[in-house]
Structure formats: C-alpha cells, structure tokens
Amino acid sequence: MYSKTLPTGIDKILWSETKIKRRVCELAAEIEQDYLKSISNKHPRYQPIVAIGILKGAFIFLSDLIRAISVPVEPDFVRVSSYSMGVNPGQLHFVHDAKTSLKERHVLIVEDIVDTGLTLSFLANEFKKRGAASIKFCALIDKTCRREKEVQLDYVGFHYSGDAFLVGYGLDYEEKYRNLIYIATLSPSAIQSSS
Ligand code: IMP
C-alpha cells in the first residue's frame, strides 16, 4: 500500500512492489533453468553460482533474487568508482573487490540499472582475466538512452527507454530513496534544487 502523497521529489511510480516481486521471481526461475541445463549437480566439477552484486544499488535486488533461486548460490559484492582526477580521469577501479576466487566459477553479475554500460564492460573484462568458467549479466533495469558500451544482457527485469533518473528498490539519488519499495522517476526539479 502506498500513501496517496508520494515522497518529496518523486514524480511517478513505474513499477510497484507487486510487479517487482513477480518479475524477480520470473528472472530467478529463468536463471535456475539455464544453470540446471548447462551444468548438472552430478558433475564432478559442480560449483554453486557466484552472484556478484554491484554496490550499493544492487543490494536489495540481489538479496531478493538469490532467495528466489533454489540451486546453491554464493553471493559476493563489488563496488566500483571512476577516478575524477589524476592520470586516468573517468577510468573505473575497484573500491571494494569480491573475496571469492572466480577461477572456473559460473559468475552472475547482478546490477540494479545499466546506463552507459561502462561498469558492466569493466567487470566483464576483469572477471575474464580471473578465469571465470562463464560470465552472465542480470540487470533489474536496462536503461538504454545513454548507452556507450554495448553489453549483452542475459536477464533483464524491465526495459526503460526514457531519460528520467530512477530511484527506489536500492536505487538512490544522493543516498536517498533506496528504501522505497517501488521504482519511480525523480522529478527534474529535485535534481536541480540539490545542485
Ligand atoms: P553505467 O552503466 O556504468 O553507466 O553505471 C550504472 C550505474 O549508474 C548504476 O549501478 C547506478 O549506480 C547508476 N545509475 C545510472 N542511472 C541511474 C538512475 O536512473 N538511477 C539511479 N542510479 C543510476
């Protein structure tokens, strides 16, 4: 249930709690099926999926997703940031790295929202170097309007072609709104008034 008045700065709810829950369960079922098809748990080298959430935005999505998957999953997290100054401005680096060894593991990268695609392509390159057996991408939202790097997403919750800034269900604007149970657009005036 939502109160009739939306929090300050929120424009429009795009996906309700019910819609998100349903979609997360559908994604979990797809992932589980694909995983069971590609690797049997009788296989001598059977290993649980390593689901790597990208902090901070994916923490809610990852925790709901893995609880809807019934094959073994090991969660881990990374956090990446871009240098604002120095020799390589704009270049991504790890602020927090995964602790799990990815060698010969089936890795599922879990992202809240894909925007330019730079984060996912950076992670794919890094994890390939570590010898992952497979790397798949799962994004709750595929926001296409500012894409710079083409990334092949294996699982997508919702497609979004608009250019609004989205918040809720882990997504923030200046650390606010992560705890909203729905995903909504942020009004442009909320962005202007904070800058
Ligand atoms: P990119 O795909 O490398 O541009 O980075 C995606 C990251 O940018 C996401 O993990 C979010 O942290 C952030 N981001 C991009 N668009 C939005 C948005 O609409 N709302 C909230 N965060 C966003």
Image (spheres, rainbow, N blue to C red):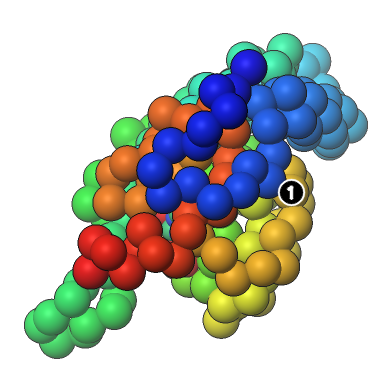
- In front of the other: 38 or 192: 192
Q: Is residue 72 left or right of residue 52?
A: right
Secondary element at image label 1: strand
Q: Residue at x 48, y 54 (%)?
A: 186
Furthest toward the front, the residue is: 4
In the displayed structure, would residue 130 be above or below residue 102? below
On the image, the x and y values in percent for residue 128 come to: 52, 59
In the displayed structure, would residue 29 be above or below residue 177? above
On the rendered image, what quadrant is the N terminus found in? top right
On the rendered image, what quadrant is the C terminus found in? bottom left
On the image, the x and y values in percent for residue 41 come to: 76, 17
Q: Residue at x 27, y 64 (%)?
A: 193
In the displayed structure, would residue 186 be above or below residue 65? below
**Mark 1 Cα shell of 10 Å, populated few (<14), some (14-19), many (≥20):** some
Query: In the rendered structure, which amino acid carries the disc numbered 1?
Result: Phe
Q: Which residue is mark 1?
A: 158
Q: Residue at x 28, y 51 (%)?
A: 174
On the image, the x and y values in percent for residue 44 come to: 71, 21
Image quadrant where residue 163 sits: bottom right
Furthest toward the left, the residue is: 86
Q: Is residue 113 left or right of residue 87?
A: right
In the rendered image, is residue 182 in sight?
Answer: yes
- In front of the other: 28 or 189: 189
- In front of the other: 115 or 3: 3
